[in-house]
Image: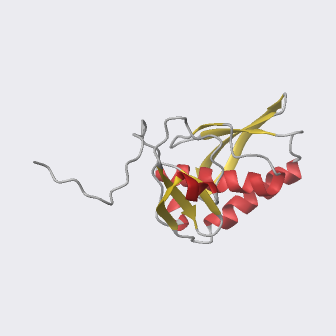
């Protein structure tokens, strides 16, 4: 008979394996977009090792100055060497600190909250680095387009 561990949280299964540096960068990007533009976190994301993309709903396309500032702010957080930590909270507790509007209907009662220092907190079951210094590069937007309120950015991590 197998003994059940009482305090082990039960979470939803995860269907993919992210590249931790890029996935952690996505968290930083999302929070920076929320702070700069007052928009929700990315509506759609495709995160890969070589390049990634995220879609944001905005009233208008960002200016080149705003894009430059977005890159600068994301890289400032990466360079801050912030710890990336995990905690387990009930949905009720998590709702006090993170937006749960994108949570699937079948989400477990216990949620895994990933924090990037005091900069970001998000419900997430993906893989992340332990500290932003492990990202090992800088965020660079390689292309973007704006169509009907959707700003899509394609980005990668570059070493300088």
In the displayed orientation, state which residue is furthest to the left.
Answer: 1
Q: Is residue 138 left or right of residue 113?
A: right
- Res 71 seen here: yes
- Quarter of the figure with residue 76: bottom right
Camera-nearest residue between 63 and 108: 108
Tell me the residue at 79%/47% (across/down).
Answer: 39
Image coords of residue 23 (percent x, y): 54, 49
The percent position of residue 119, horizontal first and vertical second, equals: 66, 65
Q: How many marks can you see?
A: 0
Measured along the vertical axis of the image, is residue 84 above or below residue 22?
A: below
114 to 39, vertically: above or below: below
Q: Nearer the viewer, residue 59 or 89?
A: 89
Q: Residue 91 vs residue 56: left or right?
A: left
Q: Nearer the viewer, residue 110 or 31?
A: 110
Q: Residue at x 50, y 55 (%)?
A: 90
Q: Position of residue 40 (x, y in %)?
A: 74, 46
Seen as rendered, the residue at the extreme top is 148
Viewer-proximal residue among 7 and 112: 7
State the colouring used for the structure image: secondary structure
How far from the left and from the top, in percent, is residue 104? Answer: 55, 36
Decide if residue 136 is in sight here: no
Which residue appears at 52% of the width and 40% of the height? 48
Q: Quadrant of the C terminus?
A: bottom right
């Amino acid at each position: 008979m197998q003994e059940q561990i009482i305090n082990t949280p039960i979470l939803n299964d995860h269907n993919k394996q992210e590249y931790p540096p890029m996935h952690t960068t996505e968290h930083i990007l999302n929070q920076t977009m929320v702070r700069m533009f007052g928009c929700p976190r990315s509506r759609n994301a495709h995160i890969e090792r070589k390049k990634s993309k995220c879609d944001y709903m905005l009233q208008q396309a960002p200016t080149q100055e705003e894009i430059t500032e977005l890159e600068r702010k994301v890289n400032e957080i990466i360079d801050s060497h912030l710890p990336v930590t995990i905690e387990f909270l009930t949905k009720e507790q998590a709702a006090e600190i993170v937006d749960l509007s994108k949570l699937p209907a079948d989400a477990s009662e216990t949620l895994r909250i990933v924090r990037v220092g005091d900069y970001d907190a998000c419900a997430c079951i993906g893989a992340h680095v332990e500290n932003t210094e492990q990202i090992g590069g800088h965020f660079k937007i390689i292309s973007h387009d704006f169509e009907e309120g959707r700003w899509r950015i394609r980005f990668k991590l570059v070493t300088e």
